[in-house]
Image (cartoon, coloured by chain):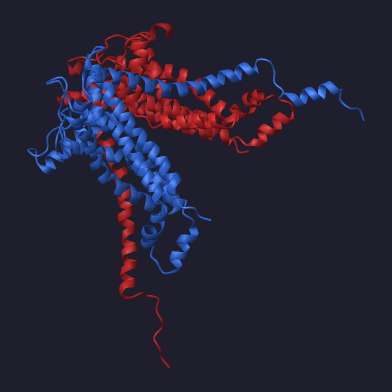
Chain colours: A blue, B red
Amino acid sequence: MTQPPEGLAAQLRKKPFARPGEKLIVGALGLCAAISVLTTVAIVITLFSETLSFFDEVSLRDFFLKTDWAPQLQGTFGVWELVAGTVNVVIWSMLISLPLGLAAAIYLSEYAHPRTRKALKPLLEALAGVPTIVYAFFALTFVTEDFLRPALGEDRVPYLNSLSASIVLAIMVLPTIASVSEDAMSNVPRALREAAYGLGATRLEVATRVVLPAAISGVLASVLLAVARVVGETMIVAIAAGSNPALTLNPLATIQTMTGYMLQIGLGDAARGTVDYSSIFAVGALLFSMTFILNVGAQLVVRRFREVYE
Amino acid sequence: MTTAEPTLQATGRVARRQQLSRSSRYLLLGATSFGIGVLVVLAWDVLQRGLPALDWEFLNSYPSRFADRAGLRSSILGSAWMVLFTVVLAIPLAVGTAIWMEEFAPRGRLLALVQLNIANLAGVPSIIYGILGLAVFVRFFDMGFTIGAGALTLTLMILPMTVIASSEAIRQVPSSTRDASLALGATRWQTVWHHVLPGALPGIMTGMILAVSRAAGETAALIMIGAASFIAFDNTGLPHDVWGQQFTTVPIQVYNWTQRPQEEFRALAAAAIIVMMVAIVGLNLIAVLIRERFRRYD
């Protein structure tokens, strides 16, 4: 049997075989990946530098300790009114969507016939695909005008209120909570359920006392993700909740959220270098930190508290 | 001897628990259907308001202060160009990133960092991408309030979800395909280009179309980078020219008309929503069809 010439075998062993030019291609691909990293760097740098120039004009104490946000009327920059607006819609939307989302997750995971599940899941997913401007329109025209004002009285419900935005936000994040929770529930091993049934538990008891506690990390993660989405949502709150910063958690009040403020200034003519322009970025930096913490928190929760089965 | 047949009918507390469980089924089903029900109400409300206002003249007129003369012509063109540019930019970028991550990147810290970064970018609110676009493209690169700036911003915005979808699709290609190709003497790039990519293509296209429909409905980011609401000209010409033109989009017109209190403008907004949803649902249906048509059963 003939052996390959010495040199060739050694060469083939040394390098992976590649045509010339492939190195360039791989380099180009790496460049694509680098752009995603560059995006994050750009976001951080942009927010950071403009925030710095914002705090050249407005003191940190004013921003974080004052409670009046009226930059264009009075020149006051207490950010808490905007944060309160965001927290307002978060609380009320979560109060609505958490029970509904959990109920949907429990139904789909524990009660539904596989065919029903196949039919309902895509419909629920469709809720997540509706553009937010459509939800915003719905919130202003139907929820406020055709529902809330007739139902609760026109003198009690202003045209722009947090409740109608919260209701629609709840519908928007319903699929997030339902999907992620349902995934967590279906990962609970059948053996746990069967043991409970064997001991005489009813379906409701198995769902609420066995499956739900076992899947609680997934449920918690879904809540964090949903809150992050609500915090970052702009159009629904800008159109339906108002542009009137107010330090209140009252759902029937007209408010402004952080995102609503950013949009308002973005619509205007704030020239570069003015404090109004840089206030967009200061509020944006706060917004970015909040959603970042929530998203990272969701990932951590899943990793830390996931029940390990065998 | 007559004894009563033992019955399986439960009594007392057990019966109550079973009854509770049985009736809870309908409560839970109701809760599940609530969201879907709201969607139905939304669709009915929009159709009822908007269909009467939807006619060819509406599609063919420019925005106007007068409701009976206002239309979607410039926004449809603006949206179409915006989507076109975004797709052309995003596809190579996203697929390239995904290929690098799945096929060529050395396993280790760098790859983990890039993956983590992409996952985090996916959770960034769209308005933040808007102010990124404002600071970087509109101001720093001096592009102004143009379609180009908007397309670049939207490309970055949909990048994370398209990269994730493409990575998934590439991962689904069975490793036996790769191994067979390499064993026959192909290089890694040849394997990717001729075997892995074609196999992953349906998944990539589906993910891309879903991301594009997200970009088509985007409002906040484009408002931040300066999309105007009163554009009375067509975005036409060579792509090179359109890149530098001011623009408006359909969602932005919806926003504009929703802000007006008059009923007629509400009807226009609803009609614009119908146009937008037809386009988006159409895109999603195409995505599903592509996925089913090109599904390889290997």
Q: Left or right: where does residue A34 sit relative to residue A81?
A: right
Q: Is residue B53 visible?
A: no
Quadrant in which the C terminus of chain B is drawn? top right
Q: Left or right: where does residue B104 sit relative to residue B249?
A: right
Q: Residue at x 29, y 9 (%)?
A: B233
Q: Left or right: where does residue B245 sit relative to residue A21?
A: left
Q: Is residue B230 visible?
A: yes
| Residue B5 sits above or below residue A208 on the image | below
Residue B78 horizontal/vertical position (percent):
34, 15
- Residue farthest to the right, as pictured: A1
Q: Residue at x 36, y 61 (%)?
A: A204
- Residue farthest to the left, as pictured: A155
Residue A198 horizontal/vertical position (percent):
46, 68
Write down the quadrant of residue A287 in the picture: top left
Residue B70 horizontal/vertical position (percent):
22, 16
- Residue farthest to the bottom, as pictured: B1
Q: Nearer the viewer, residue A268 or B75?
A: A268
Q: Residue at x 33, y 47 (%)?
A: A101
Q: Nearer the viewer, residue B186 or B205?
A: B186
Query: Total of numbered circles in the picture?
Result: 0
| Residue A298 sits above or below residue B31 on the image | above
Residue A206 horizontal/vertical position (percent):
40, 61
